[in-house]
Image: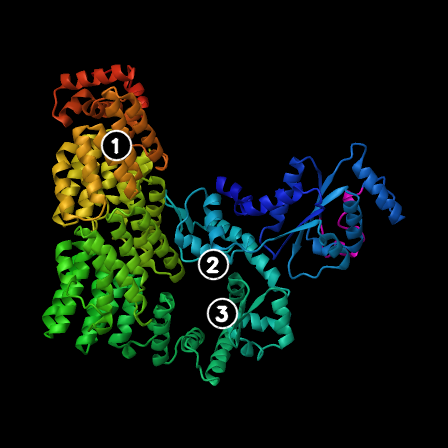
Amino acid sequence: MIVQAKLSQWPLTCRESELQTFTAAWANPRCQAVVIQGPAGVGKSRLAERFLAEAARAGFKTGRATASAAASTVPLGAVAHLIPASVDLSDPAKGFAEAASVLTGPRRRKWAIWVDDLHLLDATSAVLLRHLMDARVIRLIGTVRTSEPIGEAVSALTGGEAAFHIDLSELDSKQSEVLLPAVLGGPVGHHALRELHAASGGNVLYLRELVTGALTSGTLANDGEIWELVGDRPVRTPKLSELIEARLAGAGQDTRQVLELLALCELLPLAHAQAVASHDAIAALEETGLVQVITDRRRKTLRLAHPLYGEVLRTELPSLKRRALLMQQAERVQAHGAHRRDDALQVASWRLAATGTADPALLVHAATLARYAHDYERAVTLLRALPEDDHTAASLMLLGDCLFTLFEAEDAEKALSRAHALAQSDQELLDVTLARTMNFSYAAGSVADALSVNDTALKSLSGTEERRMLRINEGSIRALYGPALQAVTLLDEMDADPRQTPHLGIWVLAAMMRSPALALTGRTEDAVSWGEHAFALHSQLPEAVVMHPVGHLVGLTLALTDAGRLDDARRTGHRAWAVVGDARIPMAAIWISYHLGRAELLAGHPETARRWFANCAAEARIAHHNVPALRLALSGISAAAALLGDHDAAQTAEDEAATYTPMGYRAGEDRLGEAWLHVAHGSLAQARTTLARAAQAAEEASHIPSEIVLLTDIARLGGAKDVTERLTELTQLSDGALAPACAHLATALAADDPALLQAASRQLGAVGADLLAAEAAAAASAAWHRSRQAREAAAAAYEAQTYAARCEGARTPLLTTAEAAFALTPREREIALLAATNTTSKDIAASLDLSVRTVDNHLQRAYNKLGVTTRRELATALGIRAPHGQAGPGE
């Protein structure tokens, strides 16, 4: 119900600039009219209604009128209800003057009159309104539909320097990205944003109906974190269909066939359209806004002005007429030689849609073109129409590759296994091995199957270069799953120049995976340099390379994060995201979302991190059914939600994460959510145990940056003395700024040295780790306070507040306890946090290996320092969830 209520107001959400323009114009004493111009459905009426409300708040008396074609035949038909009944209009000159006098009244009232569809206003009404405007009795707010003819009298209303114009157009993608989350009350996944905007064409009215239909049908759903489309396309509502059918009804019978042909073919050369209808008829379609003419050099093509027009037209087309139109168009293109690059794709698609079959060679050629245009669904449709006996190893590899990209892992493996059996040469065997190992690694999440396929190929091939390619391919697999050191060794066999490599596909994948592999082994600066170099090399390669160069930016985002260049990582990630949306690359969309979430989490921005992790999970689960990334994404959601105090959401995400097997990538980081849930419940010792096990997994996989992150969290949660030595060792194994900054923090926390803590805060701030910097400064302030250095304590507290202000409301033990009481010792703080969640003294003693008496003594001192007497008050003082009980120190 809340969402439905917001739908009625939503066009205004992204029209703030227009509202500001109106406010400025209305404040101008010369203003007589504000006219909103734009095509149908862009929200003109809704915006005018808001303008009228703003005028009322400014003290104007208001009135409204709606012009129409029917009312335009009757003088004053649209505005008669606004004219006082006492006014005699038998003499228009005297009547108009009297109307002005009566409307003004003794109090000199000023009116704001809104006329909707002003272009349909009859001439007499226009003359009256002009008279009232000139007499300064009214100011006019009007809406005008562009491309509609306007009479001379109405033009007089909207012309001149006293009339301010606001041009309203369809929403662009950025405006839709602002509007939809505001209406739905939460983040919206990229897949849903893209599909809803594309289907609506940015038309606000159509977009509203699409969202309404998707909500009603359940195809637009919220998984608790983000709104996403469950299906591929949003669903039309009956009202939307009626609106579009009414819009299309304006086309005459002589032009209807052009519209139907465009609905089937999407684009038509102007010359082909003129074979169906006259030039004047097509010009009329363009003038009414039903079609658009696109000029590309000397070629002119025609398309429908809105994507939904085609959907409605296709629904109404009888099957026989559809077949005839498609076959006629295919014959036209072939009669002209089918010279353009995409002609083969179009002809094959049309013949297939019309007859269910097409020439096998044409189908394969068309599918190849579709694949390189990233139209994977169409490529699969074309290849599945190929008779079984006509398939070759190449066509099956193409089919398997497209199915893999769509995350249909099982069907992809079936096609690729058949391709493997048909492979005739060593090159084809390399091709199919690469495709199968990618499918197992990225879509199915089975490293064992990927390595098995690669090993089988190694046994089948004896050529030196072919075997080297397979070792490099193994390096790509191990870069994802570990061990990272072995991956780097294998990837070091790559050729320096991709143009001279024996297998370009294996080189491109290896080039993408080398940057993450180098970063995982601590060579973060090399990882950054290689990522930039590989992206530049790949961008110069011919278009025939299947993998998109944006994959290098995904790895580069990771490398920059691990190097401690968090601002650069976010910039690179957003650059990659812009490409991913335009090029429709599902795999890159999943992983750039994850790496942006991880960068934001390390920066200490949990709300932003949570949105990116949620988008990763939505892309993986709802849009593309990809399981391998889900555990990492859900663990990230859980950690971010726990930092924000949203314990229920954190628990829900962690419960789902636990149902997925760890994939091995970023080893140990898939337990961050579990650890921070323990923190949220006050179980710091259990959180440290979880993190220690995770750090061990990272060490065994040679994932040095992951181990650094996990050990740093242990230090933040009271275990600094346990991890300082290992973190110091890791600074010798890892370059970049992040490792030494984290080691410095652990050392300072272990020593409880305020000067060291303040220096660590500034070092962490320099790498962009705002939350860690805030924690270090807060701990420094507490330490300065305990040593009775008030000035230094205040300065450190100010630094802590400055950094914390950037952290989107994150709450951690170091921040909350430092703010609650400078005087608590680390042990008192740890016991107080456990007690605040109603953990009994007996259980606290068991978890910390202390006696119950020692726990009670520490707890009593904490009570005294904080000035509290119950565990509920203790929880409030520490800024965490209050327990149910009211017990004192003992229980």
Which is more N-terminal, label 2 or label 1? Answer: 2
Q: Residues within 10 Å of mark 1 (few under 14, many from 20)?
A: many
Q: Is residue 73 magenta?
A: yes
What amino acid type should be assigned to the residue bearing mark 1? Answer: Gln
Task: Say which residue label 1 marks.
Answer: 758
Q: Residue at image x 79%, y 39%?
A: 103
- In this view, the residue in front, 804 or 35, is 804
State the image coordinates of residue 511 (x, y, percent, origin top left): 23, 63
Q: Residue at x 21, y 56 (%)?
A: 526
Q: Is residue 145 left or right of residue 565?
A: right
The spot of residue 539 in percent (x, y) is 32, 66
Kindly tell me whether residue 43 is visible in this rendering.
yes
Q: CA distance from mark 3 to mark 1?
A: 63 Å
Residue 872, compared with residue 408, is above or below; it is above
Front residue (pair 565, 269): 565
**Residue hosting label 3:** 266
Task: Give the quarter of the image for residue 796.
Answer: top left
x, y (%) of residue 756? 21, 32
Q: Is residue 773 magenta?
A: no
The secondary structure type at the circle numbered 1 is helix
Q: Quadrant of residue 794?
A: top left
Disc 2 marks which residue?
A: 198
Q: Are marks 1 and 2 in contact (CB under 8 Å)?
A: no
The residue nearer to you, when weighing 291 against 249, is 291
Secondary element type, mark 2: helix
Q: In terms of sequence position, does the residue under pointer 3 or pointer 2 come before the other?
A: 2
Q: Amino acid at mark 3?
A: Glu
Distance between mark 1 and mark 2 Cα atoms: 51 Å
